[in-house]
Structures are given as C-alpha cells and as structure tokens.
Amino acid sequence: MKIQLQHLTKTFHSPGRKSSGEVVAVNDFTFEIPDGQLIGLLGPSGCGKSTTLNLICGLERPTGGKIFFGDRDVTDLPPELRGVGMVFQNYALYPHLTVRKNILFPLENLKGKDRLSKEEMARRVDEAASLVQIGELLDRKPSELSGGQQQRVAIARALVKMPHVLLLDEPLSNLDARLRLQTREEIRKIQRATKITTVFVTHDQEEAMSISDRIVVMKEGVLQQIGQPQQVYDDPANLFVAKFLGTPPINVFDGQIQGGMLHLGGEAVLPVPGIPDQRVTVGIRPEGFLPQADGPLSCTLSGVEVMGRDISVVASHPACQSPTLRAIITADAPVDRSAQSVCFALKPEKVFLFQPDSGCRIRSVP
Amino acid sequence: MRQERKAWLYLLPAILFLGAFLVYPLIDVFIYSVEEGYNFASQTYFGVGLYNYSYVLHDPYFLQAVKNTFLLVIITVPLSTGLALVISLALSSIRPLRDLFQTIYFLPYVTNTLAVGLVFMILFQKTEYTDGLINLMIQWFGGSSVDFIEGPYWAKMFVLCFYTIWVVMPFKILILTSALASVNPDYYKAARVDGTSKGRIFLRITLPMISPMVFYLIVTGFIGAFKAYSDAVALFGTDLNAAGMNTIVGYVYDMLYGDSGGFPSYASAAAIILFAIVLTITCINLLVSKKHVHY
Amino acid sequence: MERTFDFERLQGRAKRRKQVLRFFTYLLLGVWAVVVLFPFYWMLLTSVKDYGAYNAEHIPTFFTLSPTLQNYKDAFTSVPLGRYLANTVFFAVVTTALMVVVITLSAYAFARMEFRGKNLLFTLFLSLMMIPTELVVITNYATITGLELRNTFTGLILPSVTSVFYIYLLKENFEQVPDELYRAAKVDGTSDFKYLWKVMLPICRPTLVTIIILKVIECWNSYVWPRLITDDPNYFLVSNGIQEIRENGFGRENIPAMMAAVVVISVPLILLFFLFRKKIMAGVSRGGIKG
C-alpha cells in the first residue's frame, strides 16, 4: 500500500515553559512511500522520526496535514482501523503470555464479521511464526528468549494481522552488534517475502543505508532529503545530510572560491567551473582523496591505520574544521609513512560545496 | 580483629533492644501461654498445660471478638482493594487534577486514627439532642434513623467497616497508582495498534502486570484487618466488650490490662491463636497466588 | 465515499463514549474526594460552632455564620491538651533521635564493616520483621512493669527505638555509596566514625529524612503501647489524651470543644504532610506500613 504524507505537522505543548510552550516535532512533511518498499526514517535523536512513525501508526493525531494509505484518507482513523502492524523499540511483548498467546493477541481482538475461527487463528499464528523462524519457541515466555528472538516474536505479532503497513521503531537498537547485522538482513528478507510497505526508524545511518529502498533524513522536525541510499550519499542536499551519512564521516573544510578555483588554506585545489567567488564550506568524503606526490592539497601526516583492503590516512590541514582529517585509500597506494606530510589530489565527484551559514548545497551550473 | 570488635560495638544497641523487646518476648509469650493460673503480682503459677487456650476458646467475649474480626476482614479487604483499584485506574486515566486528587486521597494516612474516629462517631451517632448527619441523610432518602454507635449490631459493624476502609484506602491507592504508572506505556500502545478493547486491555494486560502488587495488598490487607483494634476504640470507646464490638487484638489487650485485665496468660494464648489464624490465612493466600499471579 | 462516512459516524460515537466515560471518572474521583475530606470539614466546622448553638441544632447545619474560637480556649484550659501535646512532641523527638542513632550504627556495620557471621546476623534481623507487635507486647508490658517504669517516658520510649525495617532501608542506601569514597577516606586516615558522620550521612540524607518523618508520624499516632504503659494523665500522649477527653473530659456533650481538640491534634501531621508530601508518599510506597 502506498503511503502519502501531505504537509504533516505535529506540535507538542511542553508544560512548564510558559513562553515558547510549543515544540514542533514534525514540521510540514510531504512525501510519498511507494507500495512495497522498505523505508528508513533516519535522524539524530529528537529529530521527530518516532513522532512521524506514531503519526503514520495513528497513535498520535497530527496538528495539521493529511495521511493517505492508498487513496484513503486515514488521518482521523484510530490505529486499529488503519491496518498497521507496529514493532516497538523494546518489543512490548506481554511478559505474562507465552509467545503463542502474544502472537494470537491481535487476532483475538477482531470482532464481528472480522472474527476468525479458532483453526484459522492457529493457522495464522503458525504461518507468522514460521515466517520469522520461531516455530519451536511458541510455548515459551518472552523472558526465556534472547533479544533477537524477542524481536522476531514482536515482528510476528505485528504481521499476524496481515497489515498493509509495517512500522518498526528502532528495531535493532536493543541488540548487540553481531545480532544487529544478522537481524537487519532478516528484516530485509521478511519484507521482501511479504512485500508489505515497511517504515522503520533508526538513528544509525549504516543500518538505514544497508537495507532501505529509500531513506528519509530528518533534522529537528524538518525533512532534509529523501531518496535511495546511494543517491543521498552521493548527492547530499545540505551539509547536515553530508555529515550525517558515511563512516568515517565526511571531512569539512573552510574554503574560498576564486576565479573558478576552490582554495583551501590559500592553495588552489580543484577547479569548480561556473560558481561565483565566495566563501564556502567544503565537504570531502574520505574516499575522495588521491595520494599524489604533486597533489595540490598538502597535509601534515599524523598516522596511517591499516584496515586490510584499505588504509586510513590520518592527517591535519589548517583549513579543516576538525583537528584531523581522514582519508581512505587503497592499501597499495604510494604513501610514505615516515614522511612529515602527504599530498592529495581530489576526486571532483566526492567534493561538495555548501553555503557557510545555511549549510545549503552550492551546485555548479554547467 | 579490631575491626570485628568495632562492628559488634556498632551493632550492640540494636542487638540489645531487639533482644530485650522482640526476641525474648516472642519466646516468653509461648511460656506465658502454657503457665496455668499465673498470678501477675506474685509471679507464680500452678502448673503447665493448655488450660489457657481452652479458657480463651470458651470465653464468649473471645468468640464475639473472633466473629467481629472475621466479619471485618471478609468485608473490608475485598471492598477496599477493589475500590482502591477502581480509584487508581480512574486516577491514572486523567491528567488534570490528578496530583490534587492524589494528595487528598492520602490525607487519612497522616491523621490520628483515634482523633478522626471521634469525627466519625459524631457523624454517625444518634443522641437525644440530634440524630446526627448520617441519619439526616438517611431521612432525606426516606429511611428511618438508626444509632450507628450504640444501636443494632449490623449498624455498628457497618460504621466499623466504613471507617476501616476509609483508613486503609490511602496506602492501597498509593501502591496501586504507582504499580499502574510502572507499566510500560508501550504495552498500551501495542494494544491500541491491535485494536484491543478497554475491558480486554484491563483484564489481559493491566491486571496481570500489576497482579504482584494487588496480591501484596491483599496479603497485607488480611494481616492488617486481623489486627484491627484502634479503629474500633476510636468509634466505640475503650470498653469494647460492653459494646459487643471487640476484636481479637482488643481482647488480648483487655486481658492484659484495664478493668478486666491482669491475665497475661490468657492474653498470650489469645495472641498466639490470632497469629495461628493469620499465618494460616497468609499461607493460603500464598498458595492461591502461585496459581494466579504472574512472574 | 460510503466507507468514509461510516468511519466518521464510528468516530463520533467513540468520542461521545469517551466523554461519558470521562464524566463518570471525574464523578467517581470527586465523590471519593468528598468522602475523604468531609470528616475534616466537619471537624473544623464543629470546632468553631458555639456550644449552645451546636446543642440547639436538632438538624445539623452545614455551615455556621458566627464562628467562635471559644472551643479552642476550652480545649486548652479545661483539659490538659497542652500537656498531651508537649508529651507527644517530647516522646516523638526523643524516640526518633534515639532510633536514628541506633539504626545508623547498625546499618553502617552491616553495610561497611566486615565481621564473622554478618550475613547470618542480617538474615536473623530481617526475619525479626515478621514478628507481630501484638505478640511481644504482652511480655514487654510485664518487663516494663517489672522494672517499675510504668508512667515514665523511659518506659514509653525504650521498646520503640529500634526498627529492623529502617535498618534495612538505610543499609541498602549506605551500600550505594561507592567503595572508592571509603578507601579514599581510609587513605587519608579518616576514622570510621568520622567517615560515617561526615560522608555517609550527608550523602544518605534524603533516606534519613524520609525515615525520620515516617517515624515521627508513627510516634504521633501511637496508641496501644502508651495506653498499656500509662494511666497517669500526666504522661498521656495525644491518642490517649483524646480518648480520655472523650470519656471523661468536658462533660460528655461538649462536642465542639472535643472537635477543637481533634483539630489541634490533627493539624501538626497534616502540616508535616503538606511540607514533605513527595517524600512521605515515596517513603510509604517503598514499604511503609500503617504505623
């Protein structure tokens, strides 16, 4: 089912503060989620991503704007009439019920003509359980399960109603690192198998990038960018998005455009045709550096970290906003580890220019 | 070694006081209870046996006290726990005024039982001058007035139960509201997403989640109600036997001291019988709870 | 189109149901608030009614137009209410102070000192919590009578200067103070006693304050033990005092004066409650028992 958000806004009254007693959690969101996709809502904590999820779910009422599931306006519908399944951050499995009864719980709520027969309910529970591979755990209590298993039970409980939309709130944050990798693949697989439009919330950009069909980047209640992960990474809309995506993070410099050339600390490092002279903030991805003996960007070398296939060069440059910058280059690149300095050429497609104050992207006009 | 000696020194006052006023008396009460014909003044007794128990069990005052206590327990424990549950649920479902209500509801906890009991007495009492406020209200609704303090047994029992519930409610409401507040709100959100009805949320989620606390209240409620005494004194005065409203604990104290006192052996026997009853009931409670309380 | 209309109606009905439920919720809460507050109102009201006017009311009135403080004067002059109050304050202060010393020392020993049999002793202490007062009061009565301590403050105070529950509470709190502080103090050559006094107690002050308040409430309301141990009105506490007033003071029917005495007895605790509302409620929900 396609989901459309139109000018969605949610403000909260924060009690206690008399002046400015309103917090805008979600500010004028408009975007569309195509049918059957897996969408990652991404942003630092407090950016309104969980609120957005709750709005889609129906647990919160928007202050303004509309939500459509397919062609139906669901803005005023309570959650149970929307056909959504939700997985909570701490899973919210009822501790006193067995796994089977937990999964059965939503089905038992159905009334009237939606009511299922006992056999049908049991069949659906088995189906959902086998989909997430917890068939042998059905008679245990949640407290007897590992974090990853609880996570799957929660997903099974959300799926058993056959929802049109599946919502996951920080689905991986309670798992340890190893399980996290495994579980995110699992989620991807389940989503592929069921083809349910799925929205999940995370603050971990790697997680969002690795499994989403599209990511939605948010900051302080404002939508920053929406697109396929690679596309957002390669073409960030502003400095925030550029900084938020990518490990190691992007290197940020203070720069100057003069006569079609980008200057960093007085040196002309890259031609940037069609951009008028101005001060700029420059973002360079770690993989955007090419070590070259006569490269225009000369940095003081502080160390080299071996990562196997690649090496990571840690250096410093006076124009860099942080004390060190980090470049990822292939292990066979010519870097003299004992040298005092290292020179780089830059890959133009890995260098982004932003306005220093607003952080807006400056694009070259060909 | 020095440290060890110092530790015992620090513990000395507590050990002395606990030994003298808690451990020794506990042993002694059993001894008292089997010393027949004990004379308080001369500290002598005739023999050892179970006569004291037999005397107490055949004493009509004791039987009256047992009857009163059991009635009080059976009426007040379920009523107060149920009412506290309803009020706590109502409290946790509202936001405006919640703090105010909570504060008001806690007030009886910090009042002197004896003093406020007097207020209940004048509210319910019927004298030759006035019928009292409660009777006035009964008359508004077309009933006929009753003296709740010196009148028929059921009326006195009613006031006693009413006052007891009034006194124990603050504790129960407090415990239950904090139990309700500690239920993770995600459970309710999950239930809402699944379209769970209010009644089902209560029966299938809320009640199981707070069942340990409800059970705790039932157990302490039983124990507390079995030990009822000062509520009755507050309403009916110190001569509870004459009012026919004595409780088991009241019987113990009356045997010990006062106009009918001076019989520590009978008092001990009665006290031990009381605690045999309380222990039995608590054990039954524990067994029942194993079946019904989750976790 | 049909379907949306249907939903709108559903929504309307749900909204109305919600309003009705909310109304009944507040009604219930309001009724119980009245049940709780009314006795307090009635005692205040009666305490300012004129004696003559009160006795002339065959049908009780819900307010008075000519409040008088005469009853309060009577309460302090014709019965020794002031004496009862002073006794109770003295009893509460001394008992609480002694108890704080005793429980602090033991809690510290359990929390910070090493000695043989510590765990066994602590378990023994905890098991003492299950001993009901009603069972031990008989022998204590005999003990105090035997020591000829009836009608003395010593006899009143002694049996209630220890509380296993408060030792337990304080010990738990002491144990939360990090070990490093203790080692640092030891390195600086601080004595155990000084460490307890200068470091532990200030850190654990919130718990200590809660314990003190709960104990004061308990003392203020204690009735059974004082009744057993005192028959000289000079040593009566407020609970016994009010019972005495009811049975022998004022002449039986001076109910306004009696209510004035009740108000005077109730006010200190209610003030204490309003001052320390959060602390008291938190303390009680941590395991308070009706004192």
Image (spheres, rainbow, N blue to C red):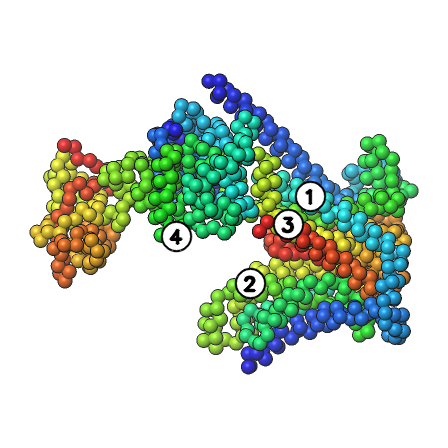
Query: In the rendered image, which residue does mark 2 sit on?
Result: C173
Q: How many marks?
A: 4
Q: Nearer the viewer, residue A184 or B249?
A: A184
Mark 2 or 3, closer to the camera: 3
Whether residue B30 is situated above or below residue A306 in the rendered picture = below
Residues at marks 2 and 1 on the same chain: no
Whether residue A354 is situated above or below residue C85 in the rendered picture = above
- Image coordinates for residue A3, horizontal then vertical, percent: 38, 29
- Image coordinates for residue B255, horizontal then vertical, percent: 86, 62
Residues at marks 4 and 2 on the same chain: no
**Dot 1, how many residues are within 10 Å of its Cα: few (below 14), some (14-19), or many (20+)?**
some
Image quadrant for the C terminus of chain A? top left
Residues at marks 1 and 3 on the same chain: yes
Can residue C73 be seen by looking at this rendering?
Answer: no
Q: Amino acid at mark 4?
A: Asp
Q: Amino acid at mark 2?
A: Asn
Give the residue at x 21% y 46%.
A285
**Which of the marked residues, 1 or 3, is nearer the chain's N terminus?**
1
Give the residue at x 78% y 59%.
B274
Mark 4 or 2, closer to the camera: 4
Lateral position of residue A197 relative to residue C60, left or right? left
Q: Please, what secondary structure does the residue beneath circle 3 have?
A: helix
Q: Nearer the viewer, residue C244 or B241?
A: B241
Mark 2 chain: C
Q: Amino acid at mark 3?
A: Lys
Q: Amino acid at mark 1?
A: Gly
**Image quadrant in which you'd find residue A215:** top left
Mark 3 or 4, closer to the camera: 3
Q: Nearer the viewer, residue B148 or B25?
A: B25
Whether residue B76 is situated above or below residue C177 in the rendered picture = above
- Label number found at residue A176: 4
Query: In the rendered image, which residue does mark 1 sit on?
Result: B82
